[in-house]
Amino acid sequence: MTPPQARHAVIIGGGPAGLMAAEILIEAGVRVDLYDAMPSVGRKFLLAGKGGLNLTHAEPADAFHSRYAGRRPALQPVIDAFDASALRDWCSKLGIDTFVGSSGRVFPVDMKAAPLLRAWLHRLRSAGVRFHMRHAWRGWDADGALMFDHPDGAVTCQPDAVVLALGGGSWARLGSTGAWVPWLGARGIDVAPLQPANCGFDVGWTPHFAEKFAGHPLKSIDIHWTDAAGVAHVRAGECMISAGGVEGSLVYAISATLRDQINASGSVTIRLDLTPGKDAARVLAEVDHPRGSRSLASHLQSRVGLAGVKMGLLRELLDKDAFNDPARLAAAIKSLPLTLTAVRPIDEAISSAGGVRFEALDAGLMTQAMPGVFCAGEMLDWEAPTGGYLLTACLGTGRHAARGVLQWLDQKP
């Protein structure tokens, strides 16, 4: 067995997964060098926390596990080993108090990402983790050494173990470029193509509608859709009108299903209930109520509560005849068809799907094709909605990969 003080691990990627892997390894007495292409670590983490850092979610375990859909079997034990409660305890030990919001989401008390990251980096540096910034990984050389480009020249190293925590393909300006995909594929590691996740969609608004309503929230609606298996679903919430289509939390929550249907069929039609608190019969009665000299817009605002962007959507998506037919208009208010024609580019997405398939890894997240090379974080083939699920899985897989490294090093001669 390799003596602990002689063990050397390299982490490539300074996001949450890479930092967590570094923490586990340094605590076990392994020498750790962390390399990142950017001038500083945690850039996507900091940007994600600008509106309030959503750390995890306090919902029951079964509901939490379900957010990982088809990858639940692979991720459930990883999540259970570092669940929401454990994550909050970890934050507390960094001096960061947390609270559970009304939605069940967990945040730092001050809502900010920067204090947590500063405390974490201080602990890692004090423990001995060495950070190497502006080192862009370029794969392996002919002898199996890691290659990095640096402003001062090329750098190579050949550690005992490597944890790749390179992120997915979204927000490339923050370091997640997906450039690693062909390098791993060339080494026989099975990688599913990267795709947008938690993403927006194109509709193709008229210039008038886009100019007037882009950036406006569409609140208190239900979205109805049918999945690829023909099962009908409904979800309540709010989304945002973008310059070309729709985005925001309600859309992100169902984006995986919508994306897959667009990939298969070229488009998908969802239906918007603009008045989810009123049944169809009531809406029809209100629309059909005599309006006297009032304009139709004033009538719908006073009788049904439609105004602003909701009224704009009706005018955008219905023909003129529909406004003279109370039955058609009422039906549209309760079930307005909206056809999504394309998925927005991956670089605009909150996260990405695809990546290193779990089938290409062993139970410790080591690649079967390259012993000693482990993978963690968003570069793995999984996806989840926003709500703390992304960060929890990144931290959990970082911990799990590091423990896989320790087990593997213990078995080396």
Image (cartoon, grey):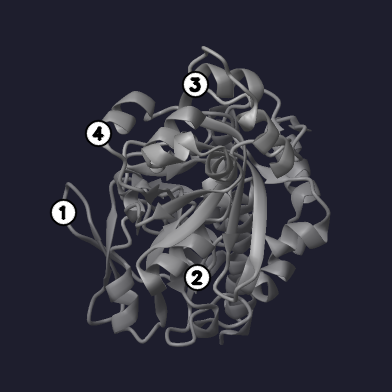
Left or right: where does residue 26 sit relative to residue 319?
right
Q: How many neighbours does mark 4 have within 10 angstroms: few (below 14), some (14-19), or many (20 or more)? A: few
Contact? badges 3 and 1 (CB < 8 Å) = no
Q: How many neighbours does mark 1 have within 10 angstroms: few (below 14), some (14-19), or many (20 or more)? A: few
User: Foreground residue, 208 or 350?
Assistant: 208
Residue type of the residue flagged with mark 1:
Gly
Contact? badges 1 and 2 (CB < 8 Å) = no
- Pinpoint residue 112: horizontal percent, then vertical percent: 58, 27
- Pinpoint residue 280: horizontal percent, then vertical percent: 69, 43
Label 4 sits on residue: 207
- Report the Cα–Cα distance between label 4 and label 2: 38 Å
Label 3 sits on residue: 297
| Label disc, if present, on residue 381 of the rendered structure | 2
Q: Quadrant of the N terminus?
A: bottom right
Contact? badges 4 and 2 (CB < 8 Å) = no
Q: Residue furthest right?
A: 60
Element at label 4: helix
Contact? badges 4 and 3 (CB < 8 Å) = no
* Residue 169 appears in the picture as rendered: yes
| Label disc, if present, on residue 153 of the rendered structure | 1
